[in-house]
Amino acid sequence: MSSQNPVFIPGPTNIPDRLRLAMQVQTQDHRAPDFVKTFAPVLEDTKKVFETTAGSIVTFPASGTGGWEAAVTNTLSPGDKVLVARYGMFSHRWIDLCQRHGLDVQVIECPWGTGAPADKFEQALAADSGREIKAVLVTHNETATGVLSDIGAVRAAMNAAGHPALLMVDAVSSLASMPFHFDAWGVDIAVSGSQKGFMLATGMAILAVSPKALAAMDTAKLPRTFFDFRDMMAANASGGFPYTPPLQLIYGMRESLRMLFEEGLDNVYARHHRLAEGVRRAVGAWGLKLVAQSPDLYSDSVSAIYVPDGFDSNILTDHAYDAYGVSFGVGLGEMNGKAFRIGHLGSLTETMVLSGLATIEMAMADLDYPITLGSGVAAAQDYYRKTRPDAARAQAA
Ligand SMILES: *Cc1c(COP(=O)(O)O)cnc(C)c1O
C-alpha cells in the first residue's frame, strides 16, 4: 500500500511534512532553561485557538480520552450528577467513562444524526431545583455521525434555567477546524487532542479550563494524580512539567500553531467549510444521504454517509482499503454496517478531497452501488471551481 495516499478517516489526520519535520527533534533535558522558551508560548498561543483569555491551557501526554478523564476527575466527586445527551459513539463513550467513575449520569437519549438538544437540557436543568446537576457534558462535533452541535444554544439553555452547572465540551474533532468560542460560550472545560485539527501525531490531550472549573477542584473528590490540573499548572508556571513531557509533540504543536496562524484561523475554517461542502455535493450527486439530519447540523470536519439499503458499509470500506489502499471511516456503533465516513479535516486540499471522492466512487462502482461513476467528483469539482478562493480575491480587488 502506498504511504503517499492520504487517509480519509476523521483522525488521526494527515501529518503535513512541515509538522513531521518539526517533530524530528533529539532528546532534550526538560529541566534545562530552553524548555521553558519552547513550551510557554505554545500554551499562550493555544488560547487563541480556543478563543479564551480567561481560561488556562492544560496538556497531558494522552489521547483525547485522557482529556475526558481529566475534565471529570478534576471537577467532580463520586455520586455527582451530570447531564449528557447520547447521539453517537463519542458521546456514548464519554457517558461510559463517567459511569465507570461512579458519577450519576442523567442521559438524554437522542436519535443518532441529531445533536445536543438545548431545549431538553433546559427542561432538565429547570427541573433540577436542588441544583444536583454539577456538569453538562456536550460533544461539539459527534465524529460518529458528522453532526455539529450548537454550544451557544446549550449555554443559552443553561442561562435560561439559571443553572450553575459546569459546561464541559468535547472539541476533539472540531477544534482548529471549525470555530470555537470558549469565552463567548461560557465553556468551563473544552477537551481536544493533537491528532485531529492540529495535524500532529496522537499523544497530547489539550484542554482549556475556566477559573470556575479550577475552583471546583477545591471540593472535587474523584481521585487524580497523572491528570491533576493544579500539579500541571504549577509545574508549567515555573517552566517545567510534573513528569516527562512529550517533547516531540510540543515542538510539533509550536509549528502547528504557526501554520494555523499563517493561514489565519478564519481561512482555516473557511477551507474546511468549502472542502466539506464539496463532499456534500458529491453525496447528493450519488443520491446518498448524510446521517446528519439537517443542514444546520452538518459538520465541516467529517461526513457520515448512509449506504443504500441492502449494502454493507464495512464491505465498502474494506474494499476501498484492499483494492485502492485508502482508508475511510467505518460506521461506529449504531452506524456499523449502515454508514461510512469521509474525514475531511486537518491538512487537506481540494486535490486530496477529489482523490478520496474518486476512490470511494470506484469502490462503490466495483460493488455495484447504484451510482454513476464520476458524478460525485464532478459535483465537487464544479463547486470547487465556482468557489475558488483566488477568484473571490480577484473579484474583491
Ligand atoms: C477522536 C475523538 C475523541 C478522542 O479519541 P482518542 O482516540 O482518545 O484521541 C473524543 N471525542 C471525539 C468527538 C473524537 O472525535
Image (tube, rainbow, N blue to C red):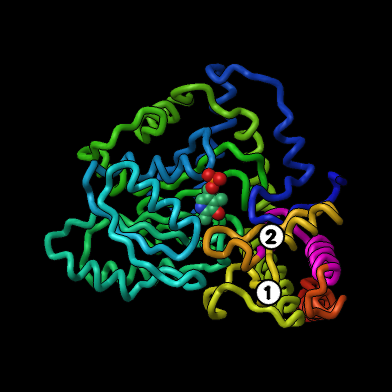
Magenta extent: 340-366
Picture coordinates of residue 166 (x, y %)? 29, 55
**Which quadrant, please, contains the N terminus?**
top right
In the figure, residue 158 lies in which quadrant? bottom left
> Please, what is the three-letter code of the amino acid marked with disc 1?
Gly
Q: Is residue 335 left or right of residue 188?
A: right
Picture coordinates of residue 311 (x, y %)? 70, 71
Pointer 1: what residue?
310
Q: Residue at x 41, y 70 (%)?
A: 110
Q: Is residue 263 left or right of residue 117?
A: right
Check the image and report above or below for 371 versus 334.
below
Front-most of 45 and 50?
50
Q: Residue at x 80, y 76 (%)?
A: 376
* Residue 258 visible: yes
Picture coordinates of residue 322 (x, y %)? 82, 52
Is the shortest distance between ligand 1 and the CB of mark 1 under 8 Å? Answer: no
Residue at far front of view: 310
* Residue 394 visible: no
In the figure, residue 228 lies in which quadrant? top left
Numbered disc 2: secondary structure: helix
> Please, what is the three-letter code of the amino acid marked with disc 2?
Asn
In the figure, residue 319 lies in which quadrant? bottom right
Pointer 2: what residue?
314
